[in-house]
Amino acid sequence: MPGWLRLPRWPWYQWLFLGLALLYVVPFWVVRYVPTIDGPCHLYNAWILRHYGDTAHYPMVNRYFELLPKPFPNWLSHLLLAGLMWVFPPLVSEKLLLSGYVLLFLGGLWYLAGAVDPERRWLAYFGFLFVFSLSLQFGFYNFCYSLGLFAIAVGYWWRRRDSLDLAAAVKLNLLLWLCYFAHIISTVLALAAIAVLWLASLRRENFKRRLLHIVALAPQTILPLWFLSAQGSTIYPAEAGFHSLWPAFVHFSVFFGLEEQTRLGVGLEVVFALLVALSVGTRLRHWRQRPPLPPLAAAPAIGDTPGRSAALPAGRREPAAASDLGFLLLAVGLAVLYFVGPEGMSGGSLLKMRLAAYPWLVLIPWLAPGLRGFAKGAAIGALALLAVLNLGYVVHCYRQLVTRLQPFLSGLDKAESHTVVVPLLFARFGSCSRAGYLGHTIDYVALAKDLVDWNNYEAVTGYFPLRFKEFASHDTYTVEATPGDVRPRELMEQVDYVYCWKIRPGQRIRRRLRNTFTLVAAGDDYELYQSPRLHPAAAGQR
């Protein structure tokens, strides 16, 4: 048999990991729409990028939007989606993007755990319970991608920590730049993680060589500093106190985006706590049984075996702290940052939810329970069982949520193509989703009909690839956060349709809409109003 046809000789748990990873993309493909909050908005704006300049077929794109060609974070998912849409339909492109995220995230954890010790790769099974997180349910596609890139960047530096030559430095910089264009938080924290591990593994014999790392990674400060200067460094203090942050942290709340997933939280806590206890016991035995170290010899020459104890004199083992204590200290430091950090900064929000993920991710490589044989197989089996149960919950909830999306989307059937629509949503939550599921779902219809979503928050923030043109610039906060405060007379000259979801009959905004707009469609939960500016003659006959 030719060599390229031979299967790699992986251990059984590595084949099982790969099989589960492929199964974990299934939830995106068993439903027509992926029920997230901001996901449709990202897809919609990538669709605008894809068709920008095609005024013959998509006149609204160039009329209302302009490109913002600056090196902001958040470019990655938009470029990937726009590129995929050259070949695939938008809905398929979104599913491919999310499938890539799953494989990148799980592969990143596998790589990071194996970078410390190949025998610890199986600990990446924890990642299956982290995939369908609260961040994913919010639709933070760029941030989700950045987590996988964060793990790979830190793992790559660790592997090459004693042999970071020019080629390795270039690769590491490319990884971190890619991470920046996904999300700035993961880039900054990857640099912070490398700094902590750099100090934890610093020794007298490698000190001069390690100084070159500072020079090699200096270019990574340019884009984050530029972003802070462009967006400002305004900090939004956190309102939640320790009493509410602590339970959310220790119960892995950030990793459960769906209500039914939280049932697995107890099982995850028990397995994680047992492995931490076993790891502490392993460290204690190691320190008690370690042999005395001989005196240090001269520093080795550049070019020794990368990333291992070859950088040490003969007969001297690499200190346990170089791998174990460094990742533990890093996890503790990131946990402290979660508790004392702000809720938002430089225009970004929900920072706590993002920060809560990193301590657990970097703690995984530190775990060394010392399990062998049957005990190791049992631990892998327990994690795999939790992963399968989690997958079943996600498929069930996604199907249930998408069933609820159908009547919402059908309410826009009578909206004409090439028009401007503003959604006023008075209910966003439903069973299953902890984050809601109707935030920007209207954009699935908008990209199919070349509509302008007046609630396109990306186009008003100033740190996404495009924005509204000056004549269409407006504030989307009231539309999204307090739709009852919207003034219909002001909307009348700006939009063609107002789409209301679950508006109550007695609300004042409903009476105002009926006085200024024409009701053209209605159902049990929706009402579609048409502006007089679209058909003035018909409005005059009303």
Image (tube, rainbow, N blue to C red):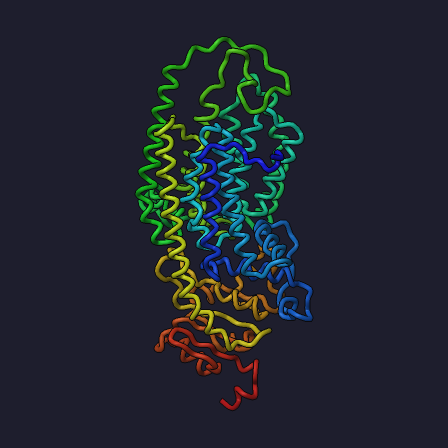
Residue 465 percent location from the top left of the image: 61, 56
Work out whether 238 lies above or below 211: below
- The quarter holding residue 370 reads top left
- The quarter holding residue 297 reads top right
**In which quadrant will I find the N terminus?**
top right
For the question of whether residue 470 can be seen, the reply is no
For the question of whether residue 501 can be seen, the reply is yes
Q: Is residue 410 left or right of residue 240?
A: right
Work out whether 229 lies above or below 160: below
Q: Is residue 162 left or right of residue 259?
A: right
Q: Residue at x 59, y 55 (%)?
A: 81
Work out whether 54 lies above or below 217: below
Q: Residue at x 52, y 86 (%)?
A: 539
Residue 154 percent location from the top left of the image: 53, 34
Furthest toward the top, the residue is: 295
Q: 266 or 501, which lies in front?
A: 266
Furthest toward the front, the residue is: 1
Q: 15 or 132, which lies in front?
A: 15
Work out whether 308 lies above or below 244: above
- The quarter holding residue 464 reads bottom right
Residue 71 percent location from the top left of the image: 63, 49
Q: Residue at x 54, y 29 (%)?
A: 158
Total numbered labels placed on residues in the image: 0
Residue 332 percent location from the top left of the image: 41, 34
